[in-house]
Image (tube, rainbow, N blue to C red):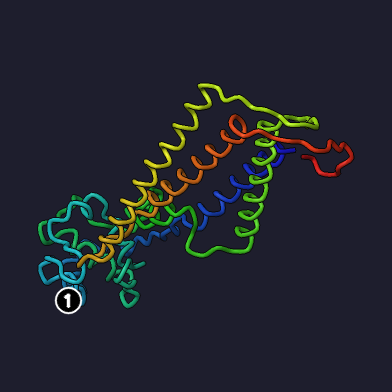
């Protein structure tokens, strides 16, 4: 039964990841040939005019201010589609520029990508954006780094709950068989620690201390970055990894202690129970 529970949990987890991936997948972009034809002609004038509303945050020459600097920005030159995504979807304190129509979006994006020391070989077009949607842009990576989309729906909550319940049942069952055996015999059961078990518990406890130090350091770094003049997003992935390792290593230490260092006692052996364990 424990193995059945774990296999079912794994199947549900795969389905859950599929739903999460569907939530975070970029929306397809329609390609309009008429827009493609006019972009190269309109961006020098319309793009400059539309950028006037952006200059208050990014600077008239793209030097930055409230918003990040755009001048000589290798990141946006290497990923022009990212500029389109930020203009249309927004990020952080910058809202989506919904007041711009499609032509104006491409005009201002190309103006930024061809000005302030930036230069791309081909103008940014809907075709470029459509091709880039097959790649994972930074905004999607940020979402996926949390393993969940922005909003959890009922099917996702249902599956996540059953994954946790089944995994917990399966792991407890496997641990019970490993630590106590398939049959329980009345009496006091003496255990004798082996050198390998001693090494294992020392190692797990030592690693627990190491990951605890790393976790505290990461939290201090993230708090300092969050409170800086230009806030830096905390590294949630690292925090979660360190915290998970602490819990798993503590669980491993307790399991080793129960198996090799703690005497057990069985008072009554009853084979009429209804529960699998």
Tell me, yes or no, if residue 36 can be seen here: no
In the displayed structure, 50 sits above or below 258; it is below
Residue 119: x, y in percent? 15, 54
Extreme residue toward the right, this view: 272
Left or right: 137, with 195 as reference point? left
Give the class, few, some or many, for how many residues have Cα within 10 Å of label 1's Cα (few <14, many ≥20).
some
Extreme residue toward the top, this view: 195
Residue 77: x, y in percent? 20, 53
In the displayed structure, 273 sits above or below 63; it is above
Residue 225 image-quadrant placement: bottom left
Residue at numbered disc 1: 56
Identify the image quadrant of the N terminus: top right
Q: 7 and 16: which one is in front?
A: 7
Tell me, yes or no, if residue 119 can be seen here: yes
In the displayed structure, 244 sits above or below 186; it is below
Q: State the residue at coordinates (81%, 44%).
A: 275
Identify the image quadrant of the C terminus: top right
Q: 11 and 213: which one is in front?
A: 213
SS at mark 1 in the image: helix
Q: State the residue at coordinates (33%, 64%).
A: 34
Left or right: 67, with 246 as reference point? left
Left or right: 52, with 209 as reference point? left
Residue 190 image-quadrant placement: top right
How many marks on residues?
1
In the displayed structure, 259 sits above or below 243; it is above
Q: State the residue at coordinates (34%, 46%).
A: 214
Residue 126: x, y in percent? 34, 58
Residue 239: x, y in percent? 39, 51
Q: 158 and 206: which one is in front?
A: 206
């Amino acid at each position: 039964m424990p193995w059945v529970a774990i296999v079912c949990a794994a199947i549900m987890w795969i389905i859950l990841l599929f739903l999460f991936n569907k939530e975070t997948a970029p929306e397809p972009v329609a390609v309009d040939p008429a827009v493609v034809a006019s972009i190269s002609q309109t961006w020098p004038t319309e793009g400059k005019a539309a950028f006037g509303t952006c200059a208050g945050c990014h600077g008239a020459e793209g030097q930055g201010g409230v918003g990040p600097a755009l001048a000589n920005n290798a990141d946006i030159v290497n990923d022009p589609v990212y500029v389109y995504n930020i203009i249309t979807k927004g990020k952080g304190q910058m809202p989506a520029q919904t007041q711009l129509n499609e032509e104006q979006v491409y005009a201002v994006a190309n103006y930024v990508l061809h000005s302030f020391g930036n230069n791309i070989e081909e103008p940014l077009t809907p075709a470029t954006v459509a091709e880039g949607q097959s790649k994972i842009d930074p905004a999607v990576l940020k979402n996926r780094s949390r393993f969940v989309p922005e909003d959890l729906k009922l099917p996702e909550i249902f599956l996540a709950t059953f994954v946790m319940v089944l995994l917990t049942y399966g792991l407890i069952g496997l641990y019970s068989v490993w630590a106590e055996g398939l049959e329980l015999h009345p009496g006091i059961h003496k255990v004798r620690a082996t050198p390998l078990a001693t090494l294992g518990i020392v190692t797990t406890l030592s690693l627990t201390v190491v990951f605890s130090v790393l976790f505290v350091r990461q939290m201090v770094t993230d708090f300092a970055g969050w409170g800086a003049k230009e806030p830096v997003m905390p590294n949630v992935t690292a925090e979660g990894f360190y915290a998970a390792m602490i819990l798993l290593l503590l669980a491993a230490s307790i399991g080793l202690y129960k198996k090799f260092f703690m005497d057990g006692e069985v008072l009554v052996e009853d084979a009429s129970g209804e529960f699998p364990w």
